[in-house]
Image (tube, grey):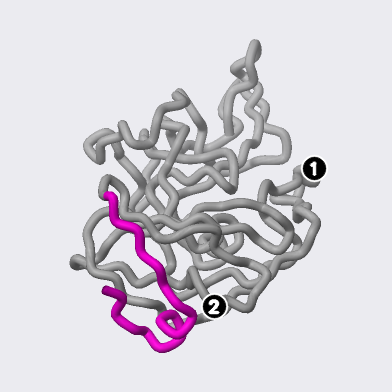
């Protein structure tokens, strides 16, 4: 709930997305194409849990304990430190909290790691339209097509550290960059740069950020889990 501008005694229902939503498989595949995504603008939110409506308040159809926003500040997600977070634990109490939220399903609040073994192989032409919450109006989801089909592959192994990226164009002409952060000095990548038979394809080699290294990956490397020199 949030106080209405100009009339703080009237509480309005709003919806916010937590980090747990963005870390689900469906969000990582459908919203982010399995790629690593860094947070952009996030909402640093102070709120209290108490019974609404309190004396002198109105709260629409809400009657009971609710989270009521006391302050909300848009910030760059990379600037937030964990010391500023006072999130909820297992034992909810009627007190104040502070946490990060997003008001959009495609703007995460923390870094979303890539999926190493899933590659997009087809998507439908139209953007998906969804009613995100029961009382909300239908919303067109950016870059989220009505249908997306992924294939699970072993993935090619590439030694290195940092961030690796490859440009991809889908069968609808949509352009994206698949990005992945190394784990234990290695990348496991799902897209080939040569020999791919699908309409979703890469348009260049893999590149490790900050280095001059360009890496070609064959379809055989992807399907067999080969180590690419």
Q: Which residue is labeled 2 in the image?
A: 195
Q: Nearer the viewer, mark 2 or mark 1?
A: 2
The residue drawn where x is 41% and y is 45% is 38
Give the side of residue 204 with respect to residue 61, left or right: left
Label 2, label 1: how far apart the Cα atoms are: 44 Å
Give the side of residue 40 with respect to residue 14, left or right: left
Q: Residues within 10 Å of mark 1 (few under 14, many from 20)?
A: few
In the image, residue 195 lies in the stretch drawn in magenta:
no
Toward the bottom, the furthest residue is 224
Q: Which residue is labeled 1 in the image?
A: 137
Q: Residues within 10 Å of mark 2 (few under 14, many from 20)?
A: few
> Looking at the image, can residue 81 be seen?
yes
Closer to the camera in the image, 212 or 117: 212
Residue 212: where, in percent of width, then height? 28, 50
Residue 229: where, in percent of width, then height? 26, 73
Residue 22 sits above or below residue 72 on the image: below
What are the residue bounds of the magenta stretch?
212-229
Residue 179: where, in percent of width, then height? 42, 56
The residue drawn where x is 27% and y is 62% is 182
The residue drawn where x is 38% and y is 49% is 111
Q: Which quarter of the picture shows residue 126?
A: bottom right
């Amino acid at each position: 709930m949030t106080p209405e501008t100009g009339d703080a005694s009237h509480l309005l229902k709003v919806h916010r997305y937590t980090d747990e939503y963005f870390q689900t498989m469906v969000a990582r595949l459908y919203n982010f194409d399995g790629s690593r995504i860094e947070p952009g603008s996030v909402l640093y939110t102070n709120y209290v849990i108490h019974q609404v409506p309190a004396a002198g308040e109105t709260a629409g159809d809400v009657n009971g304990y609710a989270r009521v926003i006391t302050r909300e500040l848009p910030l760059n997600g990379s600037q937030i430190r964990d010391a500023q977070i006072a999130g909820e634990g297992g034992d909810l109490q009627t007190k104040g909290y502070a946490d990060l939220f997003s008001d959009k399903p495609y703007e995460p609040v923390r870094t979303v790691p890539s999926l190493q073994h899933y590659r997009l192989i087809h998507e439908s032409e139209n953007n998906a339209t969804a009613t995100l919450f029961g009382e909300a109006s239908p919303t067109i989801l950016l870059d989220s097509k009505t249908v997306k089909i992924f294939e699970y592959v072993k993935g090619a192994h590439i030694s290195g550290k940092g961030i690796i990226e490859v440009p991809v164009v889908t069968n609808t002409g949509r352009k994206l960059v698949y990005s992945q952060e190394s784990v234990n000095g290695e990348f496991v990548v799902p897209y080939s740069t040569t020999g791919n038979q699908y309409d979703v394809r890469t348009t260049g080699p893999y590149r490790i950020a900050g280095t001059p290294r360009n890496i070609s990956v064959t379809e055989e490397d992807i399907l067999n889990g080969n180590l690419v020199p």
